[in-house]
Image: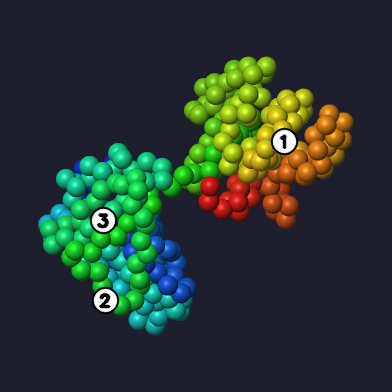
Amino acid sequence: MIDWLIWLRDIAAHEPAAMISVLASEGSAPRGAGTRMLVTATALQGTIGGGQLEYRAIEQARAILVLPAGSWRIQDYPLGPLLGQCCGGRVRLLIEHVDPAGLGWIPDATEERVLVSTLTPAGIERRISRDAIATTLSARGPAPLPGTTFAEVVGQRRRPVYLFGAGHVGQAIARHAANLPFRLAWFDTRPIFETIDGVVIVPEAGIAACVADAPDDSAILILTHDHALDYQLTKAALERPSPAFVGLIGSATKRARFDARLDREGIPAEARARLTSPIGIARVPGKEPDVIAISTLAQLLQLGPA
């Protein structure tokens, strides 16, 4: 579940809260359509880009909290001198006092569902659809009026990341991946790591089967404590038709040795070319676990949406 749905479920359902939604943007705007933040009398969750735009929007959000739940308004902001910003774009915001009685759709907002919203004088009616087509709103022209319906994809599919190894780097990757668009499956063979939340302990003889279970658009990251196990997993990954990414931790020398052995064992050159090793963005220096983790996750973000 994406963050703003969690905020609605865990916060807005239990205390007065306003939600700011970016309905549309154009030009150089800090965040795009679908961006949200939640505002209560004392706290903020998320951001629509900061600066004067966000400051003004938060003011509007807290002002709407004195109105009945379900109240909403459309706010248009040109990002120019009036806001002390020089972006030159435009943003159209929906600001609403969240009605806790209207959140029954949240449990249905699973991966790749469409949220259909209708503006009404009494509030915003929302429902989840399997087959509605997402719409695009404009940041210019007349503001949407009661009766306007729009649809957006929510709960978009996160790229599966199959992470093999729960050592220092594996733990750093898992920690930093928590707020990124990834869905982590994390494996190790050592019982010592069974107390770490999220790690699945698999016998060494069966761990290669986990590679076979990875969806086609998965990123497979191999960073175990044992070179022989790394090789077994690398070979299994490259025997797959086309995972989105196969990454192996280690040096250029390790890569060369693995490549030679893979060649001897019949893995074709085009499959071996899909191996990324060492992992991480080459121009990012440092071998600390957090540096490697952030560099590697940035590399996966470059793959784009799943």
Please report contact status of discs 1 and 3: CB closer than 8 Å, yes or no: no
Q: Check disc 1 and report the residue beneath it.
A: 238
Residue situated in front as seen by the camera: 300 or 213:
213
Residue 268 in percent (x, y) is at: 81, 38
Q: Secondary structure at mark 2?
A: loop
Q: Check disc 2 and report the residue beneath it.
A: 142
Q: Amino acid at mark 2?
A: Pro
Q: Secondary structure at mark 3?
A: strand
Q: Residue at x 68, y 47 (%)?
A: 280
Q: Is tag 1's residue or tag 3's residue first in the polypeptide sequence?
A: 3
Residue 56 in percent (x, y) is at: 30, 69
Q: Amino acid at mark 1?
A: Leu
Q: Residue at x 30, y 39 (%)?
A: 107
Is residue 57 visible in this depiction of the protein?
A: yes
Q: Check disc 3 and report the residue beneath it.
A: 117
Q: Amino acid at mark 3?
A: Ser
